[in-house]
Image: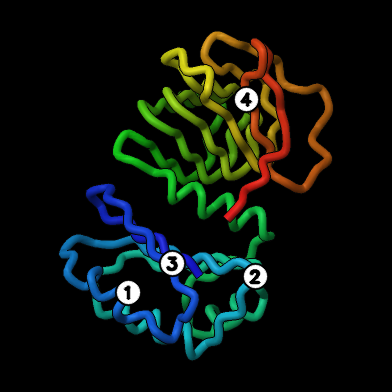
């Protein structure tokens, strides 16, 4: 299991452990943080019992946590979380990895938006842009670095707007009206995606190519 902890000053803390029965030493340092914390649990291909999750929940209940959420592709782990009234979300393995990556990559200049970006909306980031939700047709999103859409990308996306051709645009459902990376522009594909995995758009020899986004952990 991996735990991603974010405080309101945007300082990110990540901790991993193989044995959830010995967590207190690993997590003791977080009890000294005075500001509110956002805590995400990621359990990929792991069965975590309600007893084990109860230890985690009790620890975080004793410190200043404003959000506690569990993501897993294991149904028994999700059932254990719901039994303990932990906000628990079942996802496919690649979706859990994408969600984990989204939170791990956040830095001070990055922007995280949770919700739908609607037609006419313009969202811009001076770092990476993370969107948990859909980008509808008619919406425009841009970032100096990379764009990650945990949802459907149906509008216009512009990554690497400072000229960075190493930037990328990724989404769980990549069907945009237009993609732009630095000065390279491409019209979105005519056919709807037929796959069940995230995709990433990158520049290769002055052309934007779309390929599967396989996330390794």
Q: Secondary structure at mark 2?
A: loop
Find residue 26 and name its label.
1
| Mark 4 or mark 3, whichever is nearer to me | 3
Does label 3 or label 1 sit earlier along the sequence? 3
- The x and y percentages for residue 214 are 67, 45
Mark 3 near mark 1, Cβ–Cβ under 8 Å?
Answer: no
Q: Which residue is mark 4?
A: 202
Disc 2 to disc 4, how far (Cα)?
29 Å
| Mark 3 or mark 2, whichever is nearer to me | 3
Q: Quadrant of the C terminus?
A: bottom right
Disc 1 to disc 4, how far (Cα)?
38 Å
Q: Which residue is mark 2?
A: 45
Q: Secondary structure at mark 4?
A: strand
- The x and y percentages for residue 174 are 69, 33
Disc 4 to disc 3, how far (Cα)?
30 Å
| Mark 1 or mark 4, whichever is nearer to me | 1
- The x and y percentages for residue 66 are 31, 65
Mark 2 is surrounded, within 10 Å at the Cα level, by few (under 14), some (14 to 19) or many (20 or more) other residues, namely some
Q: Which is nearer the eye, 118 or 156?
A: 156
Q: Which residue is mark 3?
A: 16
Residue sitting at x 73%, y 46%: 197
């Amino acid at each position: 299991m991996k735990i991603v902890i974010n405080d309101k000053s945007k300082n990110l803390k990540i901790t991993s452990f193989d044995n959830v029965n010995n967590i207190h030493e690993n997590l003791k340092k977080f009890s000294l943080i005075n500001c509110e914390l956002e805590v995400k649990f990621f359990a990929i291909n792991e069965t975590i019992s309600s007893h084990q999750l109860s230890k985690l929940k009790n620890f975080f209940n004793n410190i200043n946590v404003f959000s506690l959420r569990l993501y897993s592709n294991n149904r028994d782990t999700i059932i254990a979380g719901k039994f303990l009234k932990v906000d628990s979300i079942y996802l496919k393995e690649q979706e859990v990895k994408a969600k984990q990556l989204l939170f791990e990559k956040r830095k001070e200049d990055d922007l995280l938006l949770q919700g739908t970006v609607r037609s006419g909306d313009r969202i811009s980031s001076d770092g990476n842009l993370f969107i948990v939700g859909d980008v509808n047709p008619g919406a425009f999103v841009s970032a100096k670095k990379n764009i990650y859409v945990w949802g459907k990308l149906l509008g216009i996306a512009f990554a690497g707007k400072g000229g960075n051709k190493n930037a990328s645009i990724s989404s769980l459902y990549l069907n945009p009206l237009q993609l732009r990376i630095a000065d390279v522009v491409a019209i979105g594909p005519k056919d709807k995606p037929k796959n069940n995995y995230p995709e990433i758009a990158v520049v290769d020899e002055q052309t934007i190519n779309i390929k599967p986004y396989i996330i390794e952990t």
